[in-house]
Amino acid sequence: MTLDVERPDPPRLGGPGDPGDYDAVEEPAEWAGEDAPREALAEMLSAGAWADAFEEWREVTSLTDDQFRVVRELGLIERFDFLWNPAAEDVGYLVPKVPSDRPDGGTLDRDERQEIEEELDELGRIVSDVLETDYVHRSSEEFGYNWE
């Protein structure tokens, strides 16, 4: 079953910036904390990486339209974050935690929260893969390469 929802805008990047907080990222020995790769990732998301990844995820997710509505109302898409890790040359992702309170005043039980978090984790993994495979040009300076 395909999720039949409108694709949201890509998240604005700017999370905690500690590589150890991101999935699919090994923590580097040193962290420069530069934002240039983050800005480049944000541009890539806007330029099509988000749309490509979201469409791929939409085909495989088990979330219902109602569950996705809750995700949107809780602002979880906007709280996603992605980070370039120069040590491992990969893109990590940070999935927001799902609160127990629903926007309509109800509550999400533990199983509902877990299912939503698992599906959002899958979205993060797909976005990370799409960025790494199709958008990050590892020969560019913004990703730590200076061939001079």
Image (spheres, helix red, strand yellow):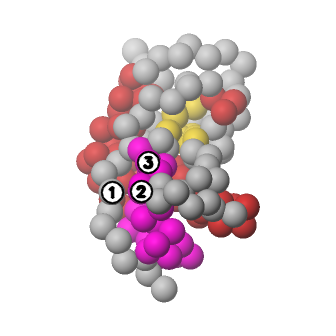
Task: Identify the image quadrant of the C terminus.
Answer: top left
Count of numbered tags = 3
The three-letter amino acid code for the residue at tag 1 is: Pro
Residue at which label 1 appears:
8
In the visual, does 18 lie left or right of 9? right
| Residue positioned 41% across, 44% down in the render | 78
The three-letter amino acid code for the residue at tag 2 is: Arg
Instruction: Report crowding for label 1: few under 14, some 14 to 19, many 20 or more residues within 10 A (C-alpha).
Output: few
| Residue positioned 42% across, 65% down in the render | 69
Give the residues in magenta. Answer: 53-78
- Disc 2 and disc 3 in contact, CB within 8 angstroms: yes
| Picture disc at residue 72 | 2
| Residue positioned 56% across, 76% down in the render | 62
Residue 43 image position (x, y, % from top left)? 30, 38
Looking at the rendered structure, the secondary structure element under dot 1 is loop
| Picture disc at residue 32 | none
Task: Measure the C-alpha gap from mark 2 to mark 3.
Answer: 5 Å
N-terminal-most mark, 1 or 2: 1
* Above or below 21: residue 56: below
